[in-house]
Image (tube, rainbow, N blue to C red):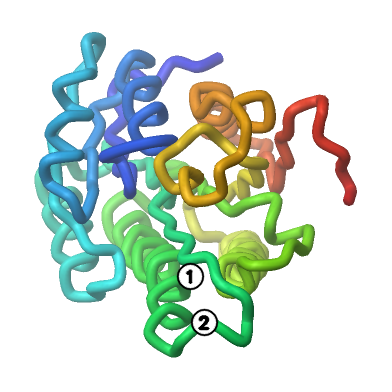
Amino acid sequence: MGDLTGRVALVTGGGSGLGRATSRLLAASGAHVLVADIDPAGAEQTVKEIDEGTAEAVTLDVTDRASVDRVVAEAAERHGAAFDLLVNNAGTDRGADLVDVDDDQWHGVFGVNLHGPMYLSRAFVKHRIANAPDTLGDIACVVSISALTVGAGAGAYNSSKAALLKLVEVIQTEAREREWPVRVTAINPAAMATPMMDQWGLPDERMMDPAIVASLIRYAVTLPPESVLQSAVITLRNESYPR
């Protein structure tokens, strides 16, 4: 298990953190990776760090529906049925208590964390239905343990991730009932050592190596086609969960 030879993967937020770790692991496992990020320099740096396998950088703002549709359409045209893996990883967190968060912060977090995965999943499912109706594609959504727990100072992030988890459940249900050629997984990690976590100042022993979470994503998308990892929570052993 773990062989992705011949598959093409689109990884959002691939320019840093978990996206970079996931892109490197998927490429090393045989996939051709489209490293997508709003920061083209970050995406290019990830491609440079991939020393096993193949990858290319793609500039993408996941909140821009037209750009999402264009990137997915271009990938479908170039790679056809081989484009069978989407990792919705891009995320943002602009920490603030509810009384301090402004409208732009709130909508900005929801735009990246919820609307982006919806735009991408919709476009990807349409691609699979049109171009590969008889073969299984994978969508892996990086949600968060914050979808299942509550912490102060991150109301927009927690709420958007809870909504994303519900969106994953909806897509899973529709994929099953409509017999779409996709399976969908929710990955719910605790804090990871990524640039997004810098604002919180957590000690190293409280944060996971993103490579651990990347390995869980790879596991989910290489399961036998008759099975699906519906939702998985991954934490360090020194974390108490459920909280």
| Mark 1, residue position | 114
Image quadrant assignment for residue 5: top left
| 40 relative to 106 in the view: left or right | left
For residue 54, side relative to residue 172 (left or right): left
Instruction: Work out which residue is located at the far top of the displayed protein and give it.
Output: 52
Image coords of residue 128 (percent x, y): 35, 55
> Could you tell me which secondary element the residue under label 1 belongs to?
helix
User: Where does the image place residue 231, in percent across and percent down from the top left?
Assistant: 71, 47
For the residue pair 138 and 150, the one nearer the viewer reads as: 150
Seen in the picture, residue 213 relative to 160 is either above or below; the reply is: above
Whole-percent x, y for residue 48 in the image: 14, 21
The residues bearing labels 1 and 2 have C-alpha atoms spaced at a distance of 18 Å
Residue sitting at x 71%, y 66%: 152
Label 1 Cα crowd, 10 Å radius (few <14 / some 14-19 / many 20+): many
**Which numbered disc covers residue 131?**
none
Residue at image location 20% in from the left, 55% down from the top: 38
| Quadrant where the image shows the N terminus | top right
Give the foreground label among 1 and 2: 2
Q: Amino acid at mark 1?
A: Leu
Looking at the image, which is closer to me, 206 or 7? Answer: 206
Which label is found at residue 101?
A: 2
Q: Nearer the viewer, residue 97 or 59?
A: 97
Could you tell me which secondary element the residue under label 2 belongs to?
Answer: loop
Q: Are marks 1 and 2 in contact (CB under 8 Å)?
A: no
Q: How many marks?
A: 2
Residue found at x 27% / y 36%: 82
Which of marks 2 and 1 precedes in the sequence?
A: 2
Q: Tell me: residue 15, above or below residue 119.
A: above
